[in-house]
Every structure is written in structure tokens, then in C-alpha cells.
């Protein structure tokens, strides 16, 4: 049973990286793109099928070199795969980066730059209230309260 849990955790982490870390065009990286980029960076041989299996939880015992290569490709430290606290911290940072890709969110953030702490707290409270009125959940990976 613990093996199934570990398999699910790895698959969830790999899936999350594919879902959140995006190329400039905004779509998800393909398994072929990731496999080719890892090879081009001098990483270990890894197939697109193997990446798909890791993401789906069908394979669960990659080598340390494979995990390091995946971490490098997605721009996270290898500890992402081994340390749940570190993974949680990184996921919060990835959520912030993902939100900042949204042009209106980025425009609001840029306009808020330079405002006093008190003003920023007021804006945060306003956004929280509007989210509540619209029935939206608290933002995932809330990084700083």
C-alpha cells in the first residue's frame, strides 16, 4: 500500500510540473519536447513513453539521474522530488509564477509596485472580498499573508 502511495506522489509531482511550467506559447510541454531537451542538455536517455508513464503513475522508480534531469528541465531543485516540505514551498512559487503569466494579474501587480504596506494590505483585503463575492476559493499555494 505504501508503494502505491509513493507512486501516486511521484506521479502527482511530475504531473504538476507539466501542468504549471509552460513554454512561451502557454501550452504544455510535450513528452517528446522534454525527452529531447534532456538529451540535448547531456542528460540521461529518457523516452517520451517513460515520461508519460511517470506522469500517469505507471512507472515509479526512476533513477536519481532521471529525476535530476527532470528537475533541471522544469527549473526546480531535485529536492522537489524527495522532500515534501520543499515541494510545497516550490509549488507555492510556481503558483505565483503561473498567476503572473496572466496579463491582467501582472498589470495589477505592476501598478501596485511602490505602494505602502498599508495600501498593499488594503488591496489584498479588497481582492479577498471580491473573490469571496464571486465564490472563488482561496488562491492555491498562498505564499504570503
Image (cartoon, rainbow, N blue to C red):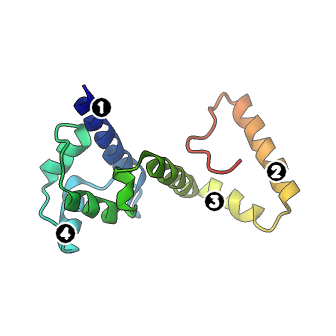
Residue 27 appears in view: no
Which badge, 4 or 2, is on the more N-terminal residue? 4
Badge 4: few (under 14), some or many (20 or more) residues near its Cα, within 10 Å?
A: some
**Which percent across, then down, holds residue 57?**
23, 37
Nearer the observer: mark 1 or 2; the answer is: 1
Q: Earlier in the sequence, mark 1 or mark 4?
A: 1
Distance CA(mark 4)–CA(mark 2): 45 Å
- First in sequence: mark 4 vs mark 3: 4
Location of residue 95 with respect to 110 vertically, above or below: above
Rendered position, 99 above or below 44: above
- Is residue 2 depicted above or below 36 in this figure? above
Badge 1 element: helix
Estimate the spatial distance between the alpha carbons at disc 1 and disc 4, rounded to whole Å.
28 Å
Q: What residue do we see at 29% from left, 41% from top?
A: 11
Give yes or no for contact between labels 3 and 2 (Cβ–Cβ under 8 Å): no
Residue displayed at 19% across by 73% down:
40
Determine the secondary structure under disc 4. Answer: loop
Q: Quadrant of residue 142?
A: top right
Question: x, y (%) of residue 10?
Answer: 30, 43
Name the residue tied to disc 2: 121
| Label 1 close to label 4 by CB (< 8 Å) | no
Label 3: which residue?
106
The answer to whether the residues at label 1 and label 2 have Cβ atoms under 8 Å apart is no
Quickly name the residue at label 4. 43
Q: Are marks 4 and 2 in contact (CB under 8 Å)?
A: no
| 1 vs 3, front mark | 1
Q: Tag 2, which secondary structure?
A: helix
Amino acid at each position: 500500500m505504501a508503494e502505491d502511495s509513493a507512486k501516486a506522489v511521484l506521479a502527482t509531482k511530475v504531473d504538476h510540473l507539466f501542468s504549471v511550467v509552460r513554454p512561451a506559447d502557454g501550452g504544455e510541454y510535450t513528452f517528446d519536447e522534454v525527452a529531447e531537451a534532456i538529451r540535448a542538455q547531456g542528460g540521461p536517455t529518457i523516452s517520451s513513453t517513460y515520461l508519460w508513464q511517470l506522469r500517469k503513475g505507471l512507472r515509479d522508480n526512476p533513477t536519481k539521474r532521471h529525476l535530476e534531469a527532470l528537475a533541471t528541465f522544469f527549473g526546480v531543485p531535485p529536492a522537489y522530488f524527495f522532500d515534501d516540505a520543499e515541494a510545497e514551498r516550490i509549488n507555492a512559487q510556481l503558483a505565483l509564477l503561473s498567476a503572473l503569466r496572466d496579463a491582467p494579474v501582472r498589470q495589477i501587480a505592476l501598478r501596485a509596485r511602490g505602494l505602502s504596506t498599508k495600501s498593499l494590505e488594503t488591496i489584498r483585503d479588497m481582492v479577498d472580498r471580491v473573490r469571496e463575492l464571486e465564490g472563488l476559493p482561496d488562491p492555491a499555494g498562498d505564499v504570503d499573508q
